Image: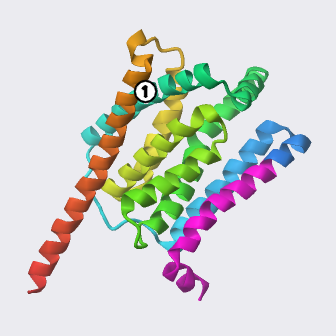
Amino acid sequence: MVRRYLQEHLWIVAVLAPMVFGVVYISATYLAYFIGPLPATVVMDVLLTVIGVGSVAWLSLMPTRQARTSLWSVSAGCVLVVAFYVSMSLLASAIYDAFGDVLFDVYTQGREEMSLTSQAVTMLVTVLLAPIAEEALFRGTMYGSLRRTSLPKFVGAMLSAGAFAFAHGTLVHIIPAFLMGLLCAGIYEYTGKLYLSVLAHVVYNVASYLAAGLIVPDFMGTWLCLLLQVVCWVGITAALFLAADKAERLTNASANAGDQ
C-alpha cells in the first residue's frame, strides 16, 4: 500500500531523497566529534549507498529508455567527463579567487592533516562509495521520480542537480556540482542505465585526484572563456535530453503503428 501510494505521488519521493541525504549528512557531522571525521564519512556513504540503491530497487524507477552503448561510446564519454572536470576545476578556482570560501579552506586543511592511511581510505570512499550513493539518491530516486511527474524532464534534472549541488555545501563546489548533476542526469536519461551515470561520477572524482596539478593555458581560466565552457556543457546536456526524447517518440510511434 505504501509503495503504491509513493508511486502515485512521486513528488513526495523526490522531496524525500535530498531530505534523507541531509539527515544522514548532519548525523555524520555530529558523529565526527565522537569517532573522527574519516569513520563518520565512511558510515555516511555506506548508509547512503544502502538507502539509495535500496530505494531505486524498491521503487523500480529506472527510465524506459535503453540506448545502445558500446565500449567506444563509453570510452569517449569518459574522456568527455575528464574534459568536463578540467572546465569545472578552472571554474571552481575562479570562484575561489573572486569570493573565497571559508568552508573550503577548512575542508582542505583537514585533508592536509590526514595521515597517508586516512587519505587512502578517503580516496576510496570518494571515488567509489560516494558516486554510488549520490547517483542512487539524486539521479535514481529524486530525478527518477520527477521524470515521471508532469514536470518537463529537463526541469526535473535541474531540481535534482540543485539539491545535489547544495548537498556539497561549499561555495566553490556549488556551480560545478550543479553542472555535474545536470550532466549525470542527461547521461542517465539518454542511456537509461544508472551505472553509466555512476561511472561518469567515478571518472570525475578520479580526475580530481589525478589531474589536480594539470597545467592549462591561462586564457581558459578567464571569465569569458569559463562562461563559454559552461554554455557548451549545458548545451551537451540539453542535446542528450533532446536525443532521448526524440528516440522515445520514435519508439512510441513505431509501437503505435504496429498496433494498428
Which residue is pictured at 55% across the width and 22% down the height?
93
Q: Amino acid at mark 1?
A: Ser
Give, as a single range, the part of the protein colored magenta.
1-28
Q: Quadrant of the N terminus?
A: bottom right
Magenta stretch: helix, strand or loop mostly: helix
Q: Quadrant of residue 138?
A: bottom right
In this orientation, which residue lies closer to the viewer: 209 or 141?
A: 141
Q: How many marks?
A: 1
64 on left or right of 180: left
- In this picture, residue 113 sits left or right of residue 259: right
Task: Identify which residue, 173 or 226, lies in the foreground.
Answer: 226
Q: Is residue 201 magenta?
A: no
Left or right side of 65 for 51: right
Label 1: element kind? helix
What crowding class fits label 1: few (fewer than 14 Cα within 10 Å), some (14-19), or many (20 or more)? some
Q: Nearer the viewer, residue 8 or 100?
A: 100
Q: Is residue 106 above or below residue 174?
A: above
Residue 53, percent from left and from top: 56, 61
Based on the displayed image, in which of its 4 quarters is residue 114 positioned? Answer: top right
Q: Is residue 161 left or right of residue 27?
A: left
Q: Which residue is mark 1?
A: 87
Residue at the image position 51 percent from the left and 74 percent from the top: 10
Identify the image quadrant of residue 260.
Answer: bottom left
Reply above or below: 169 against 187: above
Above or below, 55 relative to 21: below
4 part of magenta stretch: yes
List x then y, in percent, for residue 78.
37, 35
Colour mapping used in the image: rainbow
The residue located at (44%, 18%) in the rendering is 221
Name the residue: 59% across, 21% down. 98
The answer to whether any part of residue 132 appears in the image is no
Q: Position of residue 90 (x, y in %)?
A: 48, 22
